[in-house]
Image (cartoon, rainbow, N blue to C red):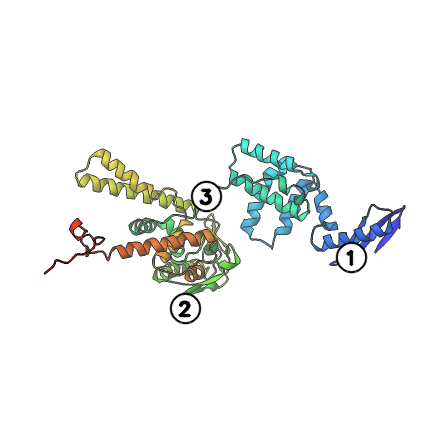
Amino acid sequence: MIYKRGGHWHMDVMVHGVRYREALDTTDKRAALNKEKERVSEIQQGKVTSPEGKAFARRPFTEAADAWVEDRKGHIADNSIAFERERLKPLKRYFIDKPLLKIRADDIRGYQKGRLALGRSAKTINGEVAVLRLMMKRARTWSLVADDVKMFPKHPRVIGRALTRDQKFHLFRTASSREEWTLAYCAAVLAVSTTCRSVELKGLRWRDVDLFGQTIQVNRSKTEAGHRAIPLNADGLAALARLRSRAEVVGSQAPDHFVFPACQSGHIDPNKHQKSWRNAWLSLVKEAAKQAGKEAARATLNAGGGIWQAKAAWKREAQAFAGFRFHDLRHQAITELAEGGATDATLMAVAGHLTREMMEHYSHVRMAAKREAVSKLEGGLISPLTPATDATKPVTRKAN
């Protein structure tokens, strides 16, 4: 409804259970009725900030940021909460007490330039501005600056790397050589056998593992599409059997216990999952590179090569493992599935969500594998054409 106060018309309406009271800035009743209809339409389309949103937009930035993180809990994963909290630190230092309502495009561009001057990468700055954008969208203030704020150009996406068959076996032979690498070793075997991401393995509980049915159920993933059942091959079963034996020794084999339990100062907490095996992974990859280089150099010297040739062979073989990430094991598994002729539907069912770019990439992988397979059928069955037998020349018959 509309009502008059001090000679000007105001509106007081309820939309979706929320009350909106505001001035219509007119003394004409007909104009007020038209404005009321327009405002109600805008409210229904989500173009108008609710009273709660207005209060959020007026809060000092540091307070709004803390409230934002707190409200996000329970809606997104803990890792995502930690990511947003980290991205908000420089934003809070820059905007301090400035409310979202007063942040303009010039402020955001100034922030981007300042962070770039400090040597921060475009990806990091884009991540920080993306969190700011989410906050401003909640406050219904992003539309005021959206057209004037540009993200930095993205670099081409690196889908991942895959090792050759020999390099793969060398990596896992190295991983199995030390007791302190056992968890990272088993996690790596599961990743390359199931396409699971690191976060999916860390969230795995024993109730999700069916050793008799030879499957695992992924219930924690990067996306909803990542929730899936994956069959286990012999390597995956062997890795889980080893982890199960370890769990029984330390008393972490209950259905709700994590397959990869947290370990702090030698104390195992099966009700929390392991945060990371990064240090072990970096260590074993470095060792794999070192051993591969040594073997290549030794083989070169034994074949009669010189010291410079041996050094070149060392560097070439070691380079294959440089920067090889744990996540690349997922790419390794999907690549091998694609090379084996798996369909798009099979890749999606096993690996979960795959972007369009990744599907196109694996389509090329499949074609390359098919081309290589067909090339093995070559047998020199067609002899080269000669001028005398050129098939393009007409054949003439001699007269009898």
Q: Is residue 21 left or right of residue 336?
A: right
156 or 329, nearer to the observer: 156
Disc 1: which residue: 14
Amino acid type indicated by mark 3: Pro
Residue 186 in view (yes/no): no
Badge 1 or badge 2: first in the primary sequence: 1
Amino acid type indicated by mark 2: Gly
343 in relation to 180, above or below: below
Q: Residues within 10 Å of mark 3 (few under 14, many from 20)?
A: few
230 or 100, nearer to the observer: 100
Q: Residues within 10 Å of mark 2 (few under 14, many from 20)?
A: few
Verify CB contact (< 8 Å) between mark 2 and mark 3.
no
The image quadrant where one finds the N terminus is bottom right
The spot of residue 344 in percent (x, y) is 42, 60
**Furthest residue toward right:** 6
Q: Residue at x 82, y 48 (%)?
A: 24
